Image (cartoon, grey):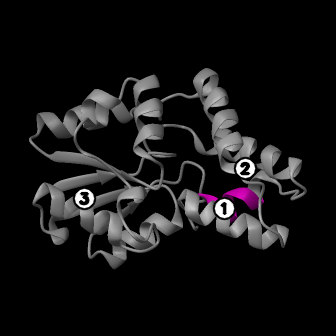
Amino acid sequence: MLVVFDCDGVLVDSELISNRVLTDTLGSVGLPLTIEQSIQEFMGRDARHLVRRSAELLARPLPEDFYERYAAARDAALETELRAVAGVAQAVDALHAAGVATCVASSGSVRKMRFTLGLTGLWDRFEGRVFSAEEVDHGKPAPDLFLHAARTLGVDPTRCAVIEGNPAGVEAANAAGMLALGYAGVTPAAG
């Protein structure tokens, strides 16, 4: 059995912080969005989607340094505001104590996960078992990332449970043939 955790919104309470900074950064280039609209458009998706979809909504290419400016502002906010999701460290420790394997599979980069999981004291619980959408051709909602994690760890996808905080991740887990468990931290339970 393998329990696959999404990172943002499941392990670390980053979604509202990241989307607040994203709306500010998008607004600075002429694309006004509310935090709710940002969550709807981008939550659970990788950087490739963010850049492509933002340019579509803006109806012109983004400035070359857009993502770098956003990531720097996001990381500065995360450094002062980020917290682990309440109870998650204890839940992961209980799984490990019961002999259940775990990993992280996120749309975020490994660099970002090292930063956020490190800030919250969670990195050591997953080191060596952290997977990013940067490692596959297609991010969530495609199943590629989850299948890559299972294959790398030598676990049949039907023996995996995925804890996800957004619809794109749940769709990806279902497409991978894995049990999808939704965590409604930011996403409404019906979402």
User: Is-magenta flag for residue 155?
Assistant: no
Image position of 11 with respect to 167: above or below: above
Q: In which quarter of the image is residue 95?
A: top left
Looking at the image, residue 107 sits to the left or right of residue 176; the answer is right
> Badge 3 local density, few (<14 within 10 Å), some, or many (20+)?
many
Image position of 191 with respect to 83: above or below: below
Q: Return the residue at label 2.
A: 66
Which mark is in front, 3 or 2?
A: 2
Q: Mark 1 falls on what kind of element?
A: helix
Q: Cα distance, mark 3 to mark 2?
A: 30 Å
Q: Residue at x 15, y 65 (%)?
A: 159
Q: How many marks?
A: 3
Amino acid type at circle 3 is Ala
83 or 139: nearer the viewer? 139
Residue 50 percent coordinates (x, y): 64, 61
Amino acid type at circle 1 is Val
Q: Which residue is drawn at 16% across and 37% down?
A: 96
Which label's residue is closer to the chain start, 1 or 3? 1
Which label's residue is closer to the chain start, 3 or 2? 2
Looking at the image, residue 148 sits to the left or right of residue 153; the answer is right
Magenta span of residues: 37-43
Looking at the image, residue 88 sits to the left or right of residue 58; the answer is left
